[in-house]
Image: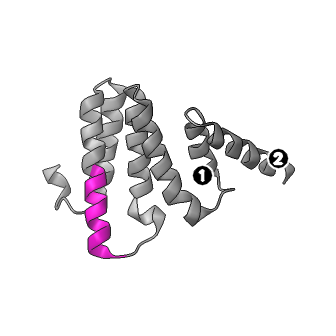
Amino acid sequence: LAVLGPLERPVTARTLDNLGHLLRREGELVEALEYHERALALRIRALSRDGWITVRQSGLSQSFYNLALAWRAMDDAAGARAYFERTLDRLEPALGPQQADVAHILADLAVYDAKAFAEIATVAKGKLAA
């Protein structure tokens, strides 16, 4: 990580998340979770330092989603659901309920929540009718 330069740079958070993905795929779930948490912490510090930036620029929703995947891989439904909900709370107001990324999160959340399942069905019907 020292090669990346200052730890406050966005590329460092992306790299930490990528390392977390690799570790999750290798079955190193606790370590993967730690890398995703470090990425989230960097993004939160950058957001508080840089002020308002767009949802996509901040990377917060990506960090929340990565943490949801890590908790799901650890078979922790409560942890996964909490981070899927945080992802949805961040993306839906910014992108709208019909956006593909929002529908994807709803589909992930539907595994844990009947209300999310109903919402994804409504989104899917809207996409088919269009």
The dominant secondary structure in magenta is helix
**On the rendered structure, is 16 left or right of 110?**
left
Magenta stretch: residue 92 in it?
A: no
Residue occupying the point 64% across, 62% down? 96
What count of labels does the image hold?
2
Q: How far across and how far down the image is residue 65, in percent?
A: 44, 45
Q: Is residue 39 visible?
A: yes
Q: How far across and how far down the image is residue 41, in percent?
A: 26, 55
**On the rendered structure, is 116 left or right of 127?**
left
Residue of label 2: 128
**On the rendered structure, is 30 left or right of 68?**
left
Secondary structure beneath dot 2 equals helix
Secondary structure beneath dot 1 equals helix
The type of residue carrying mark 1 is Val
Give the farthest residue toward the bottom: 51
Give the farthest residue toward the right: 129
Residue occupying the point 28% across, 66% down? 46
Q: CA distance from mark 1 to mark 2?
A: 16 Å
- The correct choice, above or below, for 66 with respect to 55 in the image is above
- Report the span colored magenta: 39-51
Q: How far across and how far down the image is residue 91, in percent?
A: 53, 58
Residue occupying the point 41% across, 25% down? 75
Magenta stretch: residue 46 in it?
A: yes
Give the farthest residue toward the left: 2
